[in-house]
Image (cartoon, rainbow, N blue to C red):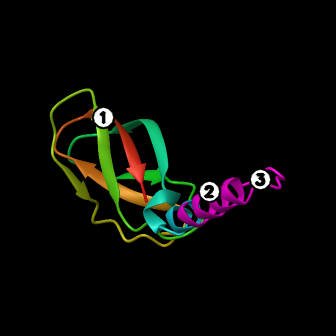
Amino acid sequence: MEKIQTADPNLQKIQDNVSKALARIERKEWMGGVILRGVELTGGTDTAVDHGLGREPLGWMVVDANAAATYYQGSTTNAHPDRTLFLRASATVTVDLWVL
C-alpha cells in the first residue's frame, strides 16, 4: 500500500493502522484462490481441471452451476497436483469454481 506523505501525525497513524490490517488479510492463504469460470464436468467421470495456482490447492468450492449435481474429488491419481485437480460430478454440468 502506497502511503501519502504527510506531516499530520493523525493521518500517518491511520495509514499505519490500515497498512497493518491489510497485511494481515494478505497473509491469509484462502485469499490466494482463483475463480475458474465455465468448467465443464461430465457426469460420472473424472475431469482434469487446470487450476493455475502453481501449488497444490487447499480445497475448492463450486460457486455457480447451470444444473443440480453433487461434486466430488475425482479418484484419478494426480501426478501434478500443483497444476491440476480431478473433479467428478453426478451429472453433466458447467460450473464456476473457487480453488484455494
Q: In what quadrant of the picture does the N terminus appear? A: bottom right
Res 41 visible: yes
From the viewer's side, name the closer residue of 32 and 11.
11
Give the overall secondary structure of the magenta segment.
helix
Q: Residue at x 16, y 44 (%)?
A: 90
| Above or below 92: residue 58 | below
Q: Find numbered disc 3 in the image and state the secondary structure of the residue it sits on.
A: loop
Q: Nearer the viewer, mark 2 or mark 3?
A: 2
Q: Residues within 10 Å of mark 2 (few under 14, many from 20)?
A: few
In the picture, the disc for residue 64 is 1
In the picture, the disc for residue 2 is 3
Q: Is residue 7 left or right of residue 53?
A: right
| Above or below 56: residue 70 | above
Q: What segment carries the magenta color?
A: 1-21
Amino acid type at mark 2? Ile
From the viewer's side, name the closer residue of 7 and 27.
7
Q: In what quadrant of the picture does the C terminus appear? A: bottom left
